[in-house]
Protein backbone atom coordinates (compact mmCIF):
# COMPACT_ATOMS: atom_id res chain seq x y z
CA UNK A 1 0.00 0.00 0.00
CA UNK A 2 2.73 2.47 1.00
CA UNK A 3 4.55 1.36 -2.14
CA UNK A 4 1.60 2.35 -4.32
CA UNK A 5 1.30 5.70 -2.57
CA UNK A 6 5.00 6.46 -2.91
CA UNK A 7 4.92 5.46 -6.58
CA UNK A 8 1.94 7.74 -7.20
CA UNK A 9 3.70 10.52 -5.33
CA UNK A 10 6.81 10.11 -7.49
CA UNK A 11 4.70 10.09 -10.67
CA UNK A 12 2.94 13.27 -9.49
CA UNK A 13 6.21 15.05 -8.77
CA UNK A 14 7.86 14.14 -12.06
CA UNK A 15 4.60 14.88 -13.89
CA UNK A 16 4.48 18.31 -12.27
CA UNK A 17 8.05 19.02 -13.38
CA UNK A 18 8.01 17.56 -16.86
CA UNK A 19 4.41 17.81 -18.08
CA UNK A 20 4.74 21.45 -19.25
CA UNK A 21 7.88 20.55 -21.20
CA UNK A 22 6.23 17.45 -22.63
CA UNK A 23 3.23 19.50 -23.75
CA UNK A 24 5.53 22.14 -25.26
CA UNK A 25 7.45 19.54 -27.22
CA UNK A 26 4.31 17.63 -28.24
CA UNK A 27 2.57 20.70 -29.70
CA UNK A 28 5.70 21.78 -31.55
CA UNK A 29 4.73 18.89 -33.86
CA UNK A 30 1.20 20.29 -34.22
CA UNK A 31 -0.14 20.18 -37.77
CA UNK A 32 -2.55 23.14 -37.45
CA UNK A 33 -2.24 26.81 -36.53
CA UNK A 34 -2.72 26.70 -32.75
CA UNK A 35 -0.76 24.85 -30.07
CA UNK A 36 -3.90 23.64 -28.29
CA UNK A 37 -5.68 20.26 -28.16
CA UNK A 38 -6.68 18.30 -30.12
CA UNK A 39 -3.25 17.25 -31.39
CA UNK A 40 -3.19 16.75 -35.16
CA UNK A 41 0.23 15.76 -36.20
CA UNK A 42 2.96 14.97 -36.14
CA UNK A 43 4.22 17.57 -38.54
CA UNK A 44 7.57 19.30 -38.99
CA UNK A 45 6.07 22.41 -40.60
CA UNK A 46 6.77 24.63 -37.58
CA UNK A 47 10.38 23.52 -37.39
CA UNK A 48 10.63 24.41 -41.05
CA UNK A 49 9.09 27.79 -40.25
CA UNK A 50 11.67 28.36 -37.51
CA UNK A 51 14.56 27.53 -39.82
CA UNK A 52 13.14 29.84 -42.49
CA UNK A 53 12.85 32.72 -40.05
CA UNK A 54 16.06 34.73 -40.44
CA UNK A 55 15.61 36.54 -37.12
CA UNK A 56 15.36 33.25 -35.22
CA UNK A 57 18.30 31.62 -37.03
CA UNK A 58 20.38 34.77 -36.52
CA UNK A 59 19.44 34.69 -32.84
CA UNK A 60 20.43 31.02 -32.72
CA UNK A 61 23.85 31.74 -34.21
CA UNK A 62 24.31 34.76 -31.90
CA UNK A 63 23.37 32.66 -28.88
CA UNK A 64 25.86 29.92 -29.76
CA UNK A 65 28.54 32.54 -30.41
CA UNK A 66 27.90 34.33 -27.10
CA UNK A 67 27.62 31.07 -25.13
CA UNK A 68 30.87 29.58 -26.43
CA UNK A 69 32.97 32.73 -26.15
CA UNK A 70 31.71 33.90 -22.76
CA UNK A 71 31.97 30.39 -21.30
CA UNK A 72 35.53 30.05 -22.54
CA UNK A 73 36.41 33.45 -21.08
CA UNK A 74 34.61 32.78 -17.77
CA UNK A 75 36.36 29.40 -17.46
CA UNK A 76 39.77 30.93 -18.21
CA UNK A 77 39.28 33.77 -15.72
CA UNK A 78 37.78 31.41 -13.13
CA UNK A 79 40.74 29.05 -13.53
CA UNK A 80 43.32 31.80 -13.16
CA UNK A 81 41.64 33.33 -10.11
CA UNK A 82 41.16 29.91 -8.48
CA UNK A 83 44.84 29.15 -9.07
CA UNK A 84 45.82 32.49 -7.59
CA UNK A 85 43.73 31.95 -4.47
CA UNK A 86 44.78 28.31 -4.04
CA UNK A 87 48.52 28.75 -4.56
CA UNK A 88 49.45 32.14 -3.15
CA UNK A 89 49.03 33.79 0.20
CA UNK A 90 46.95 36.84 -0.64
CA UNK A 91 45.98 39.56 1.79
CA UNK A 92 42.35 39.19 2.96
CA UNK A 93 42.06 36.02 0.90
CA UNK A 94 38.76 34.87 2.44
CA UNK A 95 37.14 38.27 1.88
CA UNK A 96 38.37 38.40 -1.73
CA UNK A 97 37.06 34.87 -2.37
CA UNK A 98 33.72 35.96 -0.94
CA UNK A 99 33.63 39.00 -3.21
CA UNK A 100 34.44 37.00 -6.32
CA UNK A 101 31.55 34.59 -5.67
CA UNK A 102 29.14 37.34 -4.59
CA UNK A 103 27.52 37.81 -8.04
CA UNK A 104 26.05 34.29 -7.58
CA UNK A 105 23.66 35.73 -5.00
CA UNK A 106 22.74 38.91 -6.89
CA UNK A 107 19.76 38.72 -9.23
CA UNK A 108 20.40 38.89 -12.96
CA UNK A 109 18.10 41.90 -13.12
CA UNK A 110 20.33 43.90 -10.76
CA UNK A 111 23.48 42.83 -12.59
CA UNK A 112 21.89 43.67 -15.93
CA UNK A 113 20.73 47.11 -14.77
CA UNK A 114 24.09 47.84 -13.18
CA UNK A 115 25.90 46.95 -16.39
CA UNK A 116 23.40 48.96 -18.45
CA UNK A 117 24.03 52.10 -16.39
CA UNK A 118 27.79 51.50 -16.40
CA UNK A 119 28.02 50.86 -20.16
CA UNK A 120 25.88 53.93 -20.76
CA UNK A 121 28.31 55.94 -18.68
CA UNK A 122 31.45 54.64 -20.45
CA UNK A 123 29.75 54.89 -23.84
CA UNK A 124 29.59 51.20 -24.78
CA UNK A 125 26.43 50.77 -26.88
CA UNK A 126 23.93 47.96 -26.36
CA UNK A 127 25.32 44.98 -28.23
CA UNK A 128 26.16 41.30 -28.10
CA UNK A 129 29.51 42.30 -26.60
CA UNK A 130 27.75 44.09 -23.74
CA UNK A 131 25.54 41.04 -23.14
CA UNK A 132 28.63 38.83 -23.37
CA UNK A 133 30.31 40.84 -20.62
CA UNK A 134 27.16 40.31 -18.54
CA UNK A 135 27.34 36.55 -19.11
CA UNK A 136 30.98 36.48 -18.04
CA UNK A 137 29.99 38.38 -14.88
CA UNK A 138 27.34 35.81 -13.95
CA UNK A 139 29.37 32.73 -14.93
CA UNK A 140 32.80 33.65 -13.59
CA UNK A 141 31.84 33.09 -9.92
CA UNK A 142 30.43 29.69 -10.81
CA UNK A 143 33.55 28.66 -12.74
CA UNK A 144 35.72 29.97 -9.91
CA UNK A 145 33.78 27.98 -7.29
CA UNK A 146 33.88 24.72 -9.27
CA UNK A 147 37.57 24.96 -10.16
CA UNK A 148 38.67 26.24 -6.74
CA UNK A 149 36.95 23.30 -5.04
CA UNK A 150 39.03 20.90 -7.13
CA UNK A 151 42.41 22.46 -6.34
CA UNK A 152 44.12 20.59 -3.52
CA UNK A 153 47.51 20.45 -1.86
CA UNK A 154 48.33 17.24 -3.66
CA UNK A 155 48.22 19.12 -6.96
CA UNK A 156 50.33 21.89 -5.46
CA UNK A 157 53.01 19.26 -4.89
CA UNK A 158 52.71 18.06 -8.48
CA UNK A 159 53.17 21.65 -9.68
CA UNK A 160 56.19 21.90 -7.40
CA UNK A 161 57.62 18.78 -9.04
CA UNK A 162 57.14 20.35 -12.48
CA UNK A 163 58.90 23.54 -11.35
CA UNK A 164 61.70 21.44 -9.86
CA UNK A 165 62.18 19.80 -13.26
CA UNK A 166 62.62 23.19 -14.90
CA UNK A 167 59.09 24.19 -15.97
CA UNK A 168 58.39 27.92 -16.13
CA UNK A 169 55.22 29.23 -14.56
CA UNK A 170 53.24 29.31 -17.83
CA UNK A 171 54.42 25.79 -18.59
CA UNK A 172 53.28 24.61 -15.17
CA UNK A 173 49.85 26.11 -15.87
CA UNK A 174 49.41 24.81 -19.39
CA UNK A 175 51.20 21.44 -19.15
CA UNK A 176 50.35 20.38 -15.61
CA UNK A 177 47.70 22.38 -13.74
CA UNK A 178 45.12 22.77 -16.51
CA UNK A 179 45.34 19.17 -17.81
CA UNK A 180 45.08 17.86 -14.24
CA UNK A 181 41.95 19.91 -13.70
CA UNK A 182 40.36 19.28 -17.06
CA UNK A 183 37.19 17.66 -15.61
CA UNK A 184 36.57 20.80 -13.53
CA UNK A 185 37.41 23.07 -16.48
CA UNK A 186 35.13 21.10 -18.78
CA UNK A 187 32.31 21.08 -16.21
CA UNK A 188 32.65 24.85 -15.71
CA UNK A 189 32.59 25.45 -19.44
CA UNK A 190 29.47 23.38 -20.06
CA UNK A 191 27.60 24.70 -17.04
CA UNK A 192 28.39 28.24 -18.19
CA UNK A 193 27.15 27.32 -21.65
CA UNK A 194 23.79 26.16 -20.27
CA UNK A 195 23.38 29.36 -18.25
CA UNK A 196 24.42 31.64 -21.10
CA UNK A 197 22.33 29.69 -23.61
CA UNK A 198 18.95 30.37 -22.00
CA UNK A 199 19.76 33.61 -20.17
CA UNK A 200 17.11 36.23 -20.94
CA UNK A 201 17.14 39.22 -18.57
CA UNK A 202 20.71 40.44 -19.16
CA UNK A 203 20.53 39.80 -22.91
CA UNK A 204 17.22 41.66 -23.05
CA UNK A 205 18.61 44.68 -21.21
CA UNK A 206 21.98 44.87 -22.97
CA UNK A 207 21.28 44.07 -26.63
CA UNK A 208 19.43 46.02 -29.29
CA UNK A 209 19.57 44.97 -32.98
CA UNK A 210 21.59 41.80 -32.87
CA UNK A 211 20.30 39.74 -30.02
CA UNK A 212 20.27 36.24 -28.60
CA UNK A 213 17.69 33.50 -29.15
CA UNK A 214 15.80 33.88 -25.84
CA UNK A 215 15.17 37.56 -26.63
CA UNK A 216 14.00 36.67 -30.17
CA UNK A 217 11.64 34.08 -28.68
CA UNK A 218 10.26 36.72 -26.37
CA UNK A 219 9.71 38.98 -29.41
CA UNK A 220 7.90 36.11 -31.07
CA UNK A 221 5.73 35.49 -28.01
CA UNK A 222 4.52 39.08 -28.03
CA UNK A 223 2.73 38.29 -31.30
CA UNK A 224 0.74 35.58 -29.54
CA UNK A 225 0.95 31.80 -29.12
CA UNK A 226 1.72 29.73 -32.15
CA UNK A 227 3.33 26.31 -32.64
CA UNK A 228 6.45 28.03 -34.01
CA UNK A 229 7.24 29.18 -30.45
CA UNK A 230 6.82 25.57 -29.34
CA UNK A 231 9.21 24.42 -32.04
CA UNK A 232 11.91 26.96 -31.19
CA UNK A 233 11.36 26.29 -27.48
CA UNK A 234 11.85 22.57 -28.09
CA UNK A 235 15.08 23.30 -29.93
CA UNK A 236 16.37 25.41 -27.03
CA UNK A 237 15.33 22.69 -24.60
CA UNK A 238 17.07 20.02 -26.68
CA UNK A 239 20.34 21.94 -26.71
CA UNK A 240 20.10 22.52 -22.92
CA UNK A 241 19.55 18.79 -22.38
CA UNK A 242 22.61 17.93 -24.45
CA UNK A 243 24.73 20.44 -22.50
CA UNK A 244 23.39 19.14 -19.19
CA UNK A 245 24.17 15.54 -20.16
CA UNK A 246 27.72 16.46 -21.17
CA UNK A 247 28.11 18.29 -17.85
CA UNK A 248 26.86 15.28 -15.88
CA UNK A 249 29.10 12.88 -17.77
CA UNK A 250 32.14 15.02 -17.12
CA UNK A 251 31.35 15.74 -13.49
CA UNK A 252 30.08 12.42 -12.22
CA UNK A 253 32.07 10.02 -14.34
CA UNK A 254 34.24 7.79 -12.16
CA UNK A 255 37.70 9.27 -12.25
CA UNK A 256 40.86 7.24 -11.99
CA UNK A 257 43.06 8.36 -9.13
CA UNK B 1 87.86 15.65 -0.74
CA UNK B 2 85.82 18.82 -1.32
CA UNK B 3 82.20 18.61 -0.37
CA UNK B 4 79.55 18.61 -3.10
CA UNK B 5 77.03 20.40 -0.92
CA UNK B 6 77.94 22.70 1.94
CA UNK B 7 75.27 23.91 4.30
CA UNK B 8 76.49 26.84 6.36
CA UNK B 9 74.69 27.91 9.50
CA UNK B 10 71.17 27.47 8.17
CA UNK B 11 68.40 28.71 10.46
CA UNK B 12 64.72 28.68 9.70
CA UNK B 13 61.92 30.23 11.70
CA UNK B 14 58.21 30.10 11.03
CA UNK B 15 56.80 32.95 13.09
CA UNK B 16 57.91 32.23 16.64
CA UNK B 17 58.85 28.63 15.98
CA UNK B 18 62.53 27.98 15.29
CA UNK B 19 62.55 24.91 13.08
CA UNK B 20 66.25 24.87 12.23
CA UNK B 21 68.93 26.29 14.49
CA UNK B 22 72.23 27.09 12.72
CA UNK B 23 72.66 23.75 11.02
CA UNK B 24 75.90 23.11 9.15
CA UNK B 25 76.51 20.02 7.07
CA UNK B 26 78.75 18.79 4.27
CA UNK B 27 77.61 16.24 1.70
CA UNK B 28 80.26 14.33 -0.24
CA UNK B 29 79.95 13.51 -3.94
CA UNK B 30 78.51 10.07 -4.61
CA UNK B 31 77.47 9.58 -0.99
CA UNK B 32 74.17 8.38 0.39
CA UNK B 33 73.26 10.75 3.20
CA UNK B 34 70.25 10.06 5.40
CA UNK B 35 68.67 12.78 7.51
CA UNK B 36 67.12 10.90 10.41
CA UNK B 37 64.92 12.31 13.13
CA UNK B 38 61.48 12.28 14.68
CA UNK B 39 58.71 14.40 13.17
CA UNK B 40 59.31 18.05 13.97
CA UNK B 41 63.07 17.63 14.04
CA UNK B 42 63.51 19.88 11.01
CA UNK B 43 64.78 17.22 8.61
CA UNK B 44 62.11 17.84 5.97
CA UNK B 45 62.58 21.61 6.30
CA UNK B 46 66.30 21.16 5.68
CA UNK B 47 65.53 19.09 2.57
CA UNK B 48 63.11 21.77 1.31
CA UNK B 49 65.84 24.39 1.74
CA UNK B 50 68.27 22.16 -0.21
CA UNK B 51 65.69 21.75 -2.98
CA UNK B 52 64.98 25.48 -3.13
CA UNK B 53 61.33 25.24 -2.08
CA UNK B 54 62.03 27.28 1.03
CA UNK B 55 64.22 30.31 1.68
CA UNK B 56 66.19 29.93 4.92
CA UNK B 57 65.90 32.73 7.47
CA UNK B 58 69.71 32.82 7.56
CA UNK B 59 72.65 30.77 6.35
CA UNK B 60 73.92 29.62 2.96
CA UNK B 61 73.64 26.58 0.71
CA UNK B 62 76.57 25.93 -1.61
CA UNK B 63 76.31 23.28 -4.30
CA UNK B 64 79.52 22.50 -6.22
CA UNK B 65 80.94 25.68 -4.73
CA UNK B 66 78.14 27.89 -6.04
CA UNK B 67 75.85 29.82 -3.71
CA UNK B 68 72.35 28.46 -4.39
CA UNK B 69 70.60 29.88 -1.33
CA UNK B 70 68.16 32.07 -3.24
CA UNK B 71 68.08 30.06 -6.48
CA UNK B 72 64.73 28.68 -7.67
CA UNK B 73 64.33 24.88 -7.66
CA UNK B 74 64.50 24.79 -11.45
CA UNK B 75 67.84 26.59 -11.57
CA UNK B 76 69.71 24.50 -9.02
CA UNK B 77 71.31 21.15 -9.79
CA UNK B 78 68.96 19.24 -7.50
CA UNK B 79 65.95 17.08 -8.20
CA UNK B 80 63.39 15.99 -5.64
CA UNK B 81 61.48 12.74 -5.19
CA UNK B 82 58.35 13.72 -3.29
CA UNK B 83 56.76 11.68 -0.54
CA UNK B 84 53.48 11.37 -2.45
CA UNK B 85 55.49 10.86 -5.71
CA UNK B 86 53.72 13.88 -7.32
CA UNK B 87 53.59 12.16 -10.72
CA UNK B 88 51.70 13.97 -13.49
CA UNK B 89 48.45 11.97 -13.49
CA UNK B 90 47.47 12.91 -17.06
CA UNK B 91 50.75 11.83 -18.66
CA UNK B 92 52.07 8.39 -19.48
CA UNK B 93 54.94 7.02 -17.44
CA UNK B 94 57.31 7.73 -20.34
CA UNK B 95 56.16 11.37 -20.63
CA UNK B 96 56.46 11.77 -16.86
CA UNK B 97 60.08 10.66 -16.95
CA UNK B 98 60.83 12.72 -20.07
CA UNK B 99 59.26 15.91 -18.62
CA UNK B 100 62.49 17.38 -17.23
CA UNK B 101 64.29 16.85 -20.54
CA UNK B 102 61.33 18.37 -22.39
CA UNK B 103 61.70 21.48 -20.23
CA UNK B 104 65.38 21.59 -21.19
CA UNK B 105 64.39 21.58 -24.85
CA UNK B 106 65.70 18.10 -25.67
CA UNK B 107 64.23 16.77 -28.93
CA UNK B 108 61.36 14.33 -28.58
CA UNK B 109 63.04 11.18 -29.91
CA UNK B 110 66.11 11.74 -27.79
CA UNK B 111 64.26 12.49 -24.57
CA UNK B 112 61.96 9.48 -24.96
CA UNK B 113 65.00 7.25 -25.55
CA UNK B 114 66.68 8.64 -22.44
CA UNK B 115 63.47 8.20 -20.44
CA UNK B 116 63.28 4.58 -21.57
CA UNK B 117 66.90 4.00 -20.53
CA UNK B 118 66.26 5.48 -17.11
CA UNK B 119 63.11 3.39 -16.69
CA UNK B 120 65.20 0.34 -17.54
CA UNK B 121 67.62 1.26 -14.75
CA UNK B 122 64.77 1.34 -12.23
CA UNK B 123 63.34 -1.85 -13.73
CA UNK B 124 60.14 -0.41 -15.19
CA UNK B 125 60.71 -0.12 -18.95
CA UNK B 126 57.64 -2.27 -19.64
CA UNK B 127 55.42 0.40 -18.04
CA UNK B 128 56.48 3.12 -20.51
CA UNK B 129 53.02 3.68 -22.02
CA UNK B 130 50.97 3.16 -18.86
CA UNK B 131 49.37 5.92 -16.81
CA UNK B 132 50.53 6.43 -13.20
CA UNK B 133 47.18 5.27 -11.75
CA UNK B 134 47.69 1.86 -13.35
CA UNK B 135 50.84 1.28 -11.29
CA UNK B 136 51.32 0.02 -7.74
CA UNK B 137 52.81 2.20 -5.01
CA UNK B 138 56.26 0.71 -5.40
CA UNK B 139 56.19 1.18 -9.16
CA UNK B 140 55.10 4.81 -8.85
CA UNK B 141 57.98 5.33 -6.48
CA UNK B 142 60.35 4.04 -9.13
CA UNK B 143 58.82 6.29 -11.80
CA UNK B 144 59.32 9.29 -9.50
CA UNK B 145 62.92 8.21 -9.01
CA UNK B 146 63.51 7.84 -12.75
CA UNK B 147 61.87 11.20 -13.46
CA UNK B 148 64.21 12.93 -11.03
CA UNK B 149 67.35 11.04 -12.11
CA UNK B 150 66.94 11.53 -15.86
CA UNK B 151 67.85 15.23 -15.61
CA UNK B 152 71.18 14.14 -14.09
CA UNK B 153 71.04 16.23 -10.92
CA UNK B 154 74.18 16.73 -8.86
CA UNK B 155 72.12 15.87 -5.77
CA UNK B 156 68.95 13.82 -5.58
CA UNK B 157 66.66 14.73 -2.68
CA UNK B 158 64.24 12.09 -1.39
CA UNK B 159 61.52 13.12 1.05
CA UNK B 160 60.42 10.03 3.02
CA UNK B 161 60.28 8.15 -0.28
CA UNK B 162 59.31 4.82 1.27
CA UNK B 163 56.84 6.19 3.81
CA UNK B 164 53.72 5.18 1.88
CA UNK B 165 54.80 1.58 1.25
CA UNK B 166 54.07 -1.46 3.40
CA UNK B 167 56.91 -2.93 5.42
CA UNK B 168 57.89 -5.76 3.09
CA UNK B 169 57.92 -3.54 0.02
CA UNK B 170 59.80 -0.90 1.97
CA UNK B 171 62.66 -3.28 2.77
CA UNK B 172 62.74 -4.44 -0.84
CA UNK B 173 62.76 -0.86 -2.20
CA UNK B 174 65.53 0.01 0.26
CA UNK B 175 67.82 -2.52 -1.36
CA UNK B 176 66.86 -1.27 -4.82
CA UNK B 177 67.41 2.37 -3.88
CA UNK B 178 70.88 1.57 -2.63
CA UNK B 179 71.66 -0.45 -5.77
CA UNK B 180 70.38 2.33 -8.06
CA UNK B 181 72.39 4.92 -6.17
CA UNK B 182 75.56 2.84 -6.61
CA UNK B 183 74.84 2.40 -10.31
CA UNK B 184 74.17 6.08 -11.14
CA UNK B 185 76.72 7.47 -8.67
CA UNK B 186 74.60 10.54 -7.85
CA UNK B 187 74.68 11.89 -4.30
CA UNK B 188 71.40 11.02 -2.58
CA UNK B 189 69.99 12.90 0.41
CA UNK B 190 67.18 10.92 1.96
CA UNK B 191 64.85 11.98 4.78
CA UNK B 192 63.30 9.38 7.06
CA UNK B 193 62.18 8.77 10.63
CA UNK B 194 62.87 5.03 10.35
CA UNK B 195 66.25 4.25 11.90
CA UNK B 196 66.42 0.77 10.37
CA UNK B 197 65.90 2.30 6.94
CA UNK B 198 68.57 4.88 7.71
CA UNK B 199 71.13 2.28 8.76
CA UNK B 200 70.39 0.04 5.77
CA UNK B 201 70.87 2.87 3.24
CA UNK B 202 73.24 5.47 4.56
CA UNK B 203 76.95 6.01 4.06
CA UNK B 204 76.48 9.00 6.29
CA UNK B 205 73.72 9.33 8.89
CA UNK B 206 72.70 12.76 10.19
CA UNK B 207 70.59 12.48 13.33
CA UNK B 208 68.42 15.54 13.90
CA UNK B 209 66.34 16.68 16.85
CA UNK B 210 64.69 20.02 17.65
CA UNK B 211 66.22 21.71 14.61
CA UNK B 212 69.80 20.72 15.44
CA UNK B 213 72.15 18.02 14.29
CA UNK B 214 72.63 15.69 17.25
CA UNK B 215 75.16 13.41 15.64
CA UNK B 216 76.51 12.49 12.23
CA UNK B 217 78.81 9.89 10.81
CA UNK B 218 78.91 6.38 9.32
CA UNK B 219 75.99 4.25 10.55
CA UNK B 220 78.26 1.81 12.44
CA UNK B 221 79.85 4.63 14.41
CA UNK B 222 76.57 6.43 15.08
CA UNK B 223 74.97 3.24 16.34
CA UNK B 224 77.92 1.87 18.33
CA UNK B 225 79.24 5.19 19.67
CA UNK B 226 76.39 7.70 19.61
CA UNK B 227 77.47 11.21 20.54
CA UNK B 228 74.38 12.14 22.53
CA UNK B 229 71.75 10.57 24.70
CA UNK B 230 69.08 11.42 22.12
CA UNK B 231 71.01 9.57 19.41
CA UNK B 232 71.49 6.54 21.66
CA UNK B 233 67.76 6.29 22.37
CA UNK B 234 66.58 7.16 18.87
CA UNK B 235 68.98 4.77 17.11
CA UNK B 236 67.69 1.52 18.51
CA UNK B 237 66.89 0.53 22.07
CA UNK B 238 69.19 0.71 25.04
CA UNK B 239 69.22 0.68 28.80
CA UNK B 240 70.04 4.13 30.12
CA UNK B 241 71.62 4.32 33.59
CA UNK B 242 72.42 7.71 35.16
CA UNK B 243 75.62 8.27 37.08
CA UNK B 244 78.14 10.84 38.32
CA UNK B 245 81.65 11.55 37.10
CA UNK B 246 84.37 11.41 39.76
CA UNK B 247 87.75 13.17 39.87
CA UNK B 248 89.56 10.18 38.35
CA UNK B 249 87.49 10.33 35.17
CA UNK B 250 85.16 7.47 35.97
CA UNK B 251 81.40 7.46 35.94
CA UNK B 252 79.81 5.63 38.87
CA UNK B 253 76.40 4.10 38.19
CA UNK B 254 74.15 1.56 39.84
CA UNK B 255 75.47 -1.07 37.41
CA UNK B 256 79.15 -0.36 37.91
CA UNK B 257 81.95 2.12 37.32
CA UNK B 258 83.07 2.94 33.79
CA UNK B 259 85.75 5.07 32.14
CA UNK B 260 84.43 8.49 31.20
CA UNK B 261 87.30 10.19 29.39
CA UNK B 262 86.87 13.89 28.77
CA UNK B 263 83.94 14.42 31.09
CA UNK B 264 84.23 17.04 33.85
CA UNK B 265 84.45 15.77 37.42
CA UNK B 266 81.24 16.27 39.36
CA UNK B 267 79.05 16.45 36.25
CA UNK B 268 76.24 14.02 35.68
CA UNK B 269 76.52 11.51 32.87
CA UNK B 270 74.79 8.34 31.87
CA UNK B 271 75.65 5.06 30.29
CA UNK B 272 73.75 3.28 27.55
CA UNK B 273 73.86 -0.49 27.09
CA UNK B 274 72.56 -2.01 23.84
CA UNK B 275 70.27 -5.01 24.48
CA UNK B 276 72.35 -7.27 22.20
CA UNK B 277 75.35 -6.76 24.49
CA UNK B 278 73.52 -8.10 27.53
CA UNK B 279 73.81 -11.84 28.14
CA UNK B 280 73.03 -14.30 30.88
CA UNK B 281 75.94 -14.28 33.33
CA UNK B 282 76.84 -13.97 36.99
CA UNK B 283 77.25 -10.20 37.39
CA UNK B 284 73.81 -8.65 37.84
CA UNK B 285 71.03 -10.62 39.52
CA UNK B 286 67.62 -9.32 38.42
CA UNK B 287 63.92 -10.10 38.39
CA UNK B 288 62.48 -10.68 34.90
CA UNK B 289 59.62 -8.24 34.35
CA UNK B 290 58.64 -8.94 30.76
CA UNK B 291 59.44 -11.41 28.00
CA UNK B 292 58.49 -10.75 24.37
CA UNK B 293 59.11 -13.44 21.81
CA UNK B 294 60.29 -11.74 18.57
CA UNK B 295 60.93 -14.80 16.42
CA UNK B 296 64.69 -14.60 16.05
CA UNK B 297 65.25 -13.51 19.66
CA UNK B 298 63.55 -12.89 22.99
CA UNK B 299 63.34 -9.32 24.22
CA UNK B 300 63.64 -9.46 28.00
CA UNK B 301 63.08 -6.58 30.43
CA UNK B 302 64.50 -7.12 33.92
CA UNK B 303 64.83 -5.08 37.14
CA UNK B 304 68.30 -5.49 38.77
CA UNK B 305 67.93 -6.36 42.47
CA UNK B 306 70.62 -3.81 43.46
CA UNK B 307 68.86 -1.03 41.44
CA UNK B 308 65.18 -1.98 41.05
CA UNK B 309 64.24 1.31 39.32
CA UNK B 310 66.36 0.46 36.28
CA UNK B 311 64.87 -1.53 33.42
CA UNK B 312 67.63 -3.63 31.89
CA UNK B 313 66.86 -4.59 28.28
CA UNK B 314 68.36 -7.79 26.91
CA UNK B 315 68.16 -9.58 23.59
CA UNK B 316 68.47 -13.28 24.41
CA UNK B 317 68.58 -16.24 22.01
CA UNK B 318 65.09 -17.35 21.01
CA UNK B 319 65.59 -20.75 22.67
CA UNK B 320 66.37 -19.30 26.11
CA UNK B 321 64.09 -20.64 28.87
CA UNK B 322 63.00 -17.53 30.73
CA UNK B 323 59.77 -16.60 32.48
CA UNK B 324 58.27 -13.46 33.94
CA UNK B 325 58.89 -13.16 37.68
CA UNK B 326 61.88 -15.50 37.62
CA UNK B 327 65.24 -14.43 39.00
CA UNK B 328 68.02 -14.39 36.45
CA UNK B 329 71.57 -13.05 36.35
CA UNK B 330 72.94 -10.92 33.53
CA UNK B 331 76.31 -9.63 32.46
CA UNK B 332 77.62 -7.26 29.83
CA UNK B 333 81.03 -6.33 28.47
CA UNK B 334 82.15 -2.97 29.92
CA UNK B 335 83.94 -2.28 26.61
CA UNK B 336 80.56 -2.11 24.84
CA UNK B 337 79.12 0.39 27.29
CA UNK B 338 78.41 3.82 25.78
CA UNK B 339 79.14 6.76 28.09
CA UNK B 340 77.12 9.89 27.35
CA UNK B 341 77.30 13.36 28.78
CA UNK B 342 73.92 14.34 30.21
Image: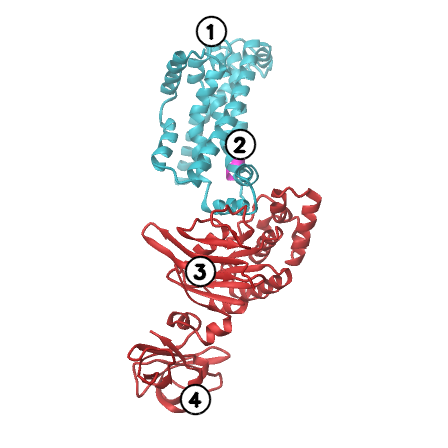
Q: Which is in the foreground here, disc 2 or disc 4?
A: 4
Which of the pair A215/A9 is nearer the observer? A215
Image position of A106 (left or right of A139): left
Q: Position of residue B120 (x, y in %)?
A: 67, 56
Labelled disc at residue A223: 1
Residue B168, magenta (yes or no): no
Q: Which is in the foreground here, disc 2 or disc 1?
A: 2
Which of the pair A24/B174 is nearer the observer? B174
Give the red chain's letter: B
Q: Provide the residue designation for mark 4.
A: B280
Tell me the SS state at disc 2: helix
Q: Are marks 2 and 4 on the same chain?
A: no
The stretch in magenta equals: A246-252
Labelled disc at residue B24: 3
- Hue used for the chain lettered A: cyan
Q: CA distance from mark 3 to mark 2?
A: 60 Å
Q: CA distance from mark 2 to mark 1?
A: 33 Å
Amino acid sequence: MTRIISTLYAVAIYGFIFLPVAVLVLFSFQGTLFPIPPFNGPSLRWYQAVLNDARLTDGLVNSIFVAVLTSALATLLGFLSAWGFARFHLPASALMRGLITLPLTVSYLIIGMGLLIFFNWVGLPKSLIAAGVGHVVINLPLCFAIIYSQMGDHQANIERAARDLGAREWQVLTLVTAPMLWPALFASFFLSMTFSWDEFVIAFLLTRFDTTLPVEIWNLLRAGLNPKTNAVGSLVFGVSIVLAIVFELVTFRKRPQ
Amino acid sequence: MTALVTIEGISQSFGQARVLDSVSLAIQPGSYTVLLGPSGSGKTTLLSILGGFLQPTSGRVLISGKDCTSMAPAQRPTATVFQDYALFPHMSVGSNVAFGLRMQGVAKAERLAKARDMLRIVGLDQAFDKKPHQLSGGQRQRVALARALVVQPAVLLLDEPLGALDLKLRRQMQDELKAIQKRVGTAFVHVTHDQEEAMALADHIVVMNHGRIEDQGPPERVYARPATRFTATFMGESTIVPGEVDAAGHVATALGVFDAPGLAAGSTACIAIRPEHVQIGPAIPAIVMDVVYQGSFKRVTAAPIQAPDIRLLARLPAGTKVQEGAQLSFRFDPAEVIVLRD
